[in-house]
């Protein structure tokens, strides 16, 4: 950050591991330096459109905002956690049946903590397999974090090639940032800046994010551009990050739909949740249909081309103007509690799905979708998002393209 930079030891490892931001001291003293922030690169994977974070030199973990712990395959020899421990109680899943005993053997003592956990990429509870609570060391940060592991990789069949597991950033006592905060005495928050390209990484911060700078060097501290909105707890799915959305505008015109769809019902359905494992924003049919009609109306003068699955509206990209924010198209505003709004411009609302097909990058989740809106990764790209866990709030910027930069413009070789 402005008053600090990486130690010489860490400069040689910048593309491979979790970094420590500190004052400049000889390498032998690196571990004694008070840690304020940990930084790691984020990579976008094709064709899965998942994002991975690099830990421990070259281990790739898929970023998931609903999984409560770090997850990976079990090594041959790994420590376990007792069923009677506080960590085991905190890891007990709400949506899946708890499995007690050492690997399901009620006569095995001492009892090791095991539990079913829903798969992040499918949100389904696995059958015939369980997760064991264990410890995963994090190189250079000092502590080992409580994590979960599986003996059966089929529990997460949709992970991209080369991924080690899942980094759980869900709203939980055992999520990765909360454990780092407790052990290293750093701020209990994290930031993600998802890249829109597979050619260069974005960046994740754990701990303090001030100041946060991207290239070119004359840009302001991006934390000064943050707007904030409360993060809402869903009692039926407490690990997710939910937003209190009051409405949606297309081309400055309100989208007309039944507002109570945005509210929680007795099953915890409704509201708006943020996801990095869903590629495109998915809307309940009661929201999607009027939203689609509003966007069709706002773009009625632009030539349509045949639809490309899974999208329902594709425009002739050769007929669209180009701006710094992507295609020149009607903007979408998500109106948030407190008067803030999240504006989506052409780069995050249209996706190039064919040579001349720019498609509306929102999909119909169907009439039985559990959430009113699931904000997908494509709409999050090139935005700085700060999850302040202590204050239960989300800080977000507009599209960074508007200030001539993007999430792939972080310089990992010098101080922030």
Image (cartoon, helix red, strand yellow):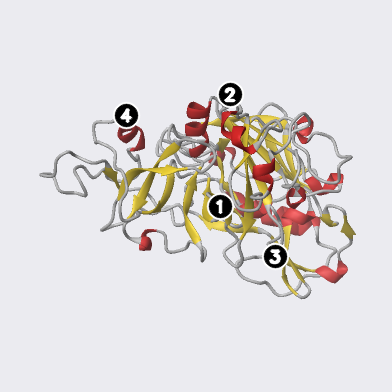
Residue 66 versus residue 30 in the image, above or below:
below
Label at residue 313: 3
Nearer mark to the viewer, of 3 and 1: 1
Upstream in sequence: badge 3 or badge 2? 3
Q: CA distance from mark 3 to mark 1?
A: 42 Å
Could you tell me which quadrant the N terminus lies in? top right
Q: CA distance from mark 4 to mark 3?
A: 50 Å
Could you tell me which quadrant the C terminus lies in? top right
Q: Is residue 30 visible?
A: yes
Nearer mark to the viewer, of 3 and 2: 2
The residue at the point 81 percent across, 68 percent down is 317
* Residue 157 lies in quadrant: bottom left
Nearer mark to the viewer, of 1 and 2: 1
> Is there a contact, CB below 8 Å, between mark 3 and mark 1?
no
Give the structural element (helix, strand or loop) at label 3. Answer: loop
Image check: 313 left or right of 49? Answer: right
The residue tagged 1 is 57
The residue tagged 4 is 86
Residue 275 versus residue 185 in the image, above or below:
below
């Amino acid at each position: 950050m402005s008053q600090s930079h990486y130690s010489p030891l860490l400069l040689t490892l910048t593309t491979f591991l979790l970094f420590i931001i500190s004052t400049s001291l000889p390498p032998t003293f690196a571990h004694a330096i008070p840690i304020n922030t940990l930084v790691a690169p984020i990579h976008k994977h094709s064709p899965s459109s998942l994002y991975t974070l690099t830990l421990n030199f070259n281990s790739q973990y898929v970023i998931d905002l609903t999984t409560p712990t770090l997850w990976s395959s079990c090594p041959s020899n790994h420590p376990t956690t007792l069923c009677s421990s506080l960590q085991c109680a905190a890891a007990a899943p709400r949506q899946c049946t708890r499995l007690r005993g050492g690997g399901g053997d009620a006569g095995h003592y001492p009892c090791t903590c095991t539990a079913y956990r829903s798969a992040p990429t499918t949100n389904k509870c696995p059958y015939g397999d369980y997760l064991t609570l264990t410890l995963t060391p994090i190189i250079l940060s000092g502590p080992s974090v409580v994590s979960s592991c599986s003996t059966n990789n089929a529990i997460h069949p949709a992970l991209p090639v080369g991924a080690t597991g899942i980094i759980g950033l869900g709203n939980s006592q055992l999520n990765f940032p909360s454990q780092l905060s407790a052990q290293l005495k750093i701020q209990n928050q994290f930031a993600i800046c998802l890249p829109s390209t597979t050619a260069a990484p974005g960046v994740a911060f754990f701990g303090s994010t001030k100041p946060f700078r991207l290239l070119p060097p004359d840009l302001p501290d991006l934390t000064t551009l943050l707007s904030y909105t409360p993060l809402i707890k869903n009692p039926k799915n407490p690990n997710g990050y939910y937003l209190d959305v009051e409405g949606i505008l297309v081309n400055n015109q309100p989208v007309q739909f039944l507002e109570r769809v945005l509210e929680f019902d007795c099953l915890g359905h409704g509201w708006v949740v943020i996801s990095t494992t869903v590629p495109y924003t998915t809307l309940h049919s009661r929201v999607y249909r009027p939203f689609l009609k509003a966007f069709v109306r706002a773009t009625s003068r632009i030539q349509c081309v045949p639809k490309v699955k899974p999208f329902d509206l594709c425009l002739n990209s050769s007929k669209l103007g180009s701006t710094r924010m992507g295609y020149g198209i009607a903007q979408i505003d998500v109106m948030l509690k407190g008067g803030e709004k999240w504006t989506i411009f052409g780069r995050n609302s249209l996706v190039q799905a064919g040579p001349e097909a720019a498609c509306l990058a929102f999909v119909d989740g169907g009439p039985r979708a559990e959430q009113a809106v699931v904000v997908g990764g494509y709409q999050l790209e090139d935005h700085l998002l700060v999850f302040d866990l202590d204050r239960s709030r989300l800080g977000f910027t507009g599209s960074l393209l508007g200030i001539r930069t993007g999430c792939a413009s972080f310089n990992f070789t010098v101080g922030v």
